[in-house]
Image (spheres, helix red, strand yellow):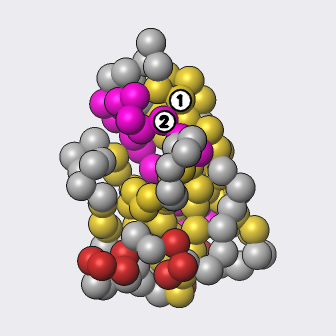
């Protein structure tokens, strides 16, 4: 099981990036995929999650309305479109999986220990 995140880079405030998470060794169809991020000196925080099946999506309040998560099961890939980027969005972004659906209870949705497999991260830097 491998997850490969890519698409990070340096962007000015207000700009956009699209991250990709490609899975290998298993089919994404049956898994929920989430994005987390970690800024220097801070704890890892959940950003967005998309369930299998109905594709229900969830977003942290800090990114709601600016980020969009989507999945292409044929390509075994999940995307995170990030618009209107802010300096506070800077960090290493990770994708991760758990079976079937994102945690239903809000209290558990952004706990890293609710997820199973993690990919290596991709760096996003928002700076002028």
Chain part drawn in magenta:
73-92
Q: Which residue is mark 1?
A: 125
Residue at image location 38% in from the left, 35% down from the top: 88
Q: Please tell me whether residue 27 is drawn above or below residue 80 in the rendered image.
A: below
Rendered image: mark on residue 90 = 2
Q: Residue at x 37, y 75 (%)?
A: 109
Q: Are marks 2 and 1 in contact (CB under 8 Å)?
A: yes
Residue found 75% across the figure and 68% down from its top: 2
Task: Give percent across and percent down for residue 70.
Answer: 42, 58
Q: Residue at x 44, y 12 (%)?
A: 128
Relative image position of residue 24 (x, y in whole percent): 74, 68
State the count of labels. Answer: 2
> Which mark sits nearer the N-terminus, 2 or 1?
2
Q: Is residue 11 left or right of residue 104?
A: right
Q: At numbered mark 1, what does the secondary structure look like: helix, strand or loop?
A: strand
Res 73 visible: yes
Q: Nearer the viewer, residue 4 or 124?
A: 124
């Amino acid at each position: 099981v491998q997850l490969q995140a890519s698409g990070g880079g340096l962007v000015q405030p207000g700009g956009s990036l699209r991250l990709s998470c490609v899975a290998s060794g298993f089919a994404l169809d049956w898994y929920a995929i989430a994005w987390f991020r970690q800024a220097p000196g801070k704890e890892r925080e959940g950003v967005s999650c998309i369930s299998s099946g109905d594709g229900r999506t969830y977003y942290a309040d800090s990114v709601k309305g600016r980020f969009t998560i989507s999945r292409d099961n044929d390509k075994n890939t999940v995307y995170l479109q990030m618009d209107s980027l802010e300096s506070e969005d800077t960090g290493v972004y990770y994708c991760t999986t758990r079976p079937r659906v994102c945690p239903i209870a809000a209290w558990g949705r952004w706990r890293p220990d609710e997820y199973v497999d993690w990919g290596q991260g991709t760096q996003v830097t928002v700076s002028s």
